Amino acid sequence: MALFVDLDHAATTSVRPEVLAAMEPFAVVDYGNPSGSHRLARSAVRALDEARERTANLLGCRPSELVFTSGGTESDNQAVSGGMPPRAGTSVCSASEHHAVLDVVEALGGSVIPVDRMARIDLDALAIELDRLGQTNSPASLVSVMLANNEVGTMSDLRAVAEVLEQHAPHAALHTDAVQAAAWLDLSEAAAPAQLVSVSGHKLGGPKGIGALVVRTGTKVRPLLLGGGQERGQRSGTVNVAGAVGLAAALECTVNELPATSSRVRALRDRLANGLLDQVDGLIETVVPDRDRSALLPGTCHVCIRDVDSETLLLLLEGSGICASAGSSCASGASSGSHVVTALGIDRQFAGGALRLTLGHTSTDADVDTVLAALPAAVDRIRQRRAS
Ligand code: PLP
């Protein structure tokens, strides 16, 4: 039996055994640097070519359109900035993006568009801003909208976003951060409207330190890292061959298991969310109207609890063996709170008690039972302490 209950799968996941097995030869035996010219190097080149082909196939792009990176943050930074030097024009994103996108847009003086009550970009506000920028000498050159939100779990309608671009900024590229969506959606379809797509290995049973950026033919992106000119000059640095093999294997396992895992985990998540609503007074599902979770990733349950502070709740849950978070893993425990919850305009009495519980392919009924037993008691304890 596990020593803890992991309800923080959106932060990271354990490496799948089949992924580890696929990677091992390229870390231990065939560990060559693919930039060399001898036997070891040639073997690494073959592994890398194969990993690129398999990954590209699963992401719905050509092998020549795929750049291996160190993870989601690097992919987002390269896509949004356009590389070094940054692309001309203005970058635009939604207010609920991960910091790996939001901070780049803000650092470049770009535009941040408000979101609706579901944390999805406000399409009317986007159209107005694209029109406004079109009248300036710095029109929009990139719009970044995540495929699924890492905190509250809402999936975006990327086709609707692409239509707004076509009408109001036809020369701007559409980037999607698909880091969270990759564990739950077939990206060859779901990410198809975007010219630039970011993914990360460790969110779907692959290793940390590997990711990919899809750059569709005709979309111009400069390298962010300069040096040896690896990845056809798009990303310098010795390529993480074992990591690339691991990313391909993790994506393959994820896509193969998708229908079965999604419906199993969705049922667990629904039991968890319904149980919490039934048992905890003053608890709301942050972006879910009337228990309709059709817009959410299958594994996400995000709630806000009145008169409770997240940090104390997380400590009490950890005391019961449950690992959870208040928001994204980088914001977890931070007293400044989540920019996503702030963007949603949630009442302060509730927002302080934000809690993200995220399930994954290894989640079980017993995990849900543990939370349903521990969480209502933890909330009671906090409220009693406050009242005394
Ligand atoms: N984008 C999203 C939506 C994420 O959830 C994360 C990780 O939390 C990242 C980007 C960053 O990915 P990485 O940890 O691979 O740098």
Image: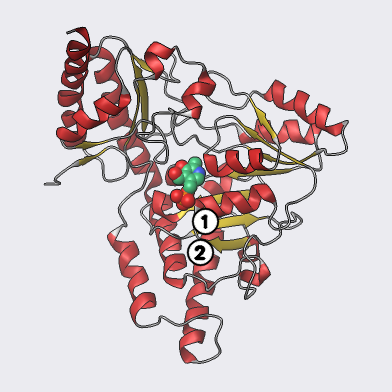
Whether ligand 1 has any atom under 8 Å from the Cβ at mark 1 is answered as no
Mark seen at residue 58: 1
Q: Quadrant of the C terminus?
A: top left
**Label 2 residue SS:** helix
Label 1 crowding class (10 Å Cα cut-off): few <14, some 14-19, many 20+?
some
Q: Is residue 61 left or right of residue 55?
A: right
Whether ligand 1 has any atom under 8 Å from the Cβ at mark 2 is answered as no
Quarter of the figure with residue 216: bottom right
Quarter of the figure with residue 209: bottom left
**Label 1 residue SS:** helix
- Contact, mark 2 vs mark 1 (Cβ under 8 Å): yes
Q: Which residue is mark 2?
A: 54
Report if residue 85 is visible in the image. Answer: yes
Residue 178's x, y, as percent? 53, 44
Q: What residue is shown at x 70% (from left), y 58% (from top)?
A: 84
Compared with residue 299, is residue 55 higher up or lower down, i.e. above or below?
Answer: below
Q: In front here: 208 or 30?
A: 208
Q: In front here: 356 or 274?
A: 356
Q: Is residue 338 left or right of residue 367?
A: right
Compared with residue 372, is residue 210 higher up or lower down, i.e. above or below?
Answer: below
Q: Is residue 111 left or right of residue 101?
A: right
Q: What residue is shown at x 31% (from left), y 21% (from top)?
A: 309
Residue 42's x, y, as percent? 51, 86
Kind of residue at disc 2: Arg
